[in-house]
Image (cartoon, rainbow, N blue to C red):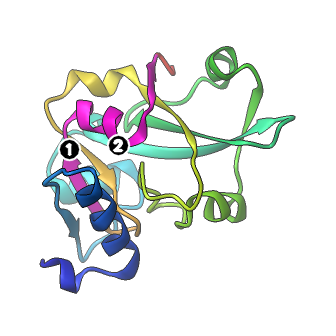
Amino acid sequence: MSEKELSKNAKRVQTALAGFGLDLVVIEFPESTRTAQDAANAIGCQVEQIVKSLVFQRQPSGKAVMIAASGGNRVNEKRIKEIVGEKIVRADAEFVHQVSGFPIGGVPPLAHTQPIETIIDEDLLNYQEIWAAAGTPNAVFRLEPKQLVQITAGKVAKIT
C-alpha cells in the first residue's frame, strides 16, 4: 500500500518515521491488529515481537508514561513505580487520546501530540525485528529494537 492510500493517522506515523531518516514502512491490514495476538496473526510473527504501546498515568503528578512492552508480557506496575518514582495507573481512553493523539489499539511509539516518557521492555531487544502499531487498530510497521530506542528516546528496563 502506498503512503497516499494510508489513513490520516497512519500517514502521521509514516511522516514521523521519515523525520528520523528511517526507511520504515507503515502497512495497513484489512483485519484488526488491535491486540498483540491479532497483530501477530495478521503479520505472521510471534506475539512476543509485537510492541504493545501502553499508556499509564503517574500518580500523583498526572503525567503520562508509555510502556513499550513485548506482546507476551504483562507490565509489573510495582516495577515501573521503582523506575519512575511514582505509582502508575492504567490510563483511560480519553487520557490516552489526549496525550498521544491516537485511539487505544492503535497507539504508536512515536508521533504523539505531546512528549511521553517511554520505558522499553528489555525483552524486545531479543528479536531482530519487532512490529509496532502505526496510528490505527489495523496499521503497523516493522523495525529493529535499536530503532525503537532511537524514535522514543526510551529507557530500556525490565518491566515484568
Residue 153 in the magenta stretch? The answer is yes
Query: Which comes before the other along the chain, label 2 or label 1?
Result: 1
Q: Give neighbour class at mark 2: few <14, some 14-19, many 20+ (Cα, 10 Å).
A: some
Residue farthest to the right?
Answer: 60
What residue type is disc 1 on? Leu
Residue beneath the point at 57% across and 48% down: 115
Q: Residue furthest bottom?
A: 5
Which residue is painted at 62% across and 65% down in the image? 97
Q: Is residue 138 above or below residue 127?
A: below
In the image, residue 111 lies in the stretch drawn in magenta: no
Judging depth in this view, the residue of 106 and 145 nearest the camera is 145
Side (left or right) of 107 relative to 123: right
In the image, taking residue 142 as reference, residue 92 lies left or right, namely right
Q: Identify the residue at horizontal 27%, vertical 50% (top origin).
A: 20
Q: Amino acid at mark 2?
A: Ile
- Kindly report which numbered mark, 2 or 1, lies closer to the viewer in this rendering: 2
Pinpoint residue 19: horizontal percent, then vertical percent: 28, 57
Task: Please give the range of residues in magenta.
Answer: 140-157
- Give the alpha-carbon distance from disc 2 to disc 1, as whole Å: 10 Å
Q: Quadrant of residue 82?
A: top right
Pick the front one: 111 or 83: 111
Quadrant placement of the N terminus: bottom left
Is 20 drawn above or below residue 25 in the view shown? above
Q: Neighbour class for label 1 at 10 Å: few (<14), some, many (≥20)?
A: some
Residue 155 % position (x, y): 46, 24
Looking at the image, how many numbered discs can be counted on the residues?
Answer: 2
Q: On the image, numbered disc 2 is attached to which residue?
A: 151
- Dot 1 lies on which element? strand
Tag on residue 143? 1
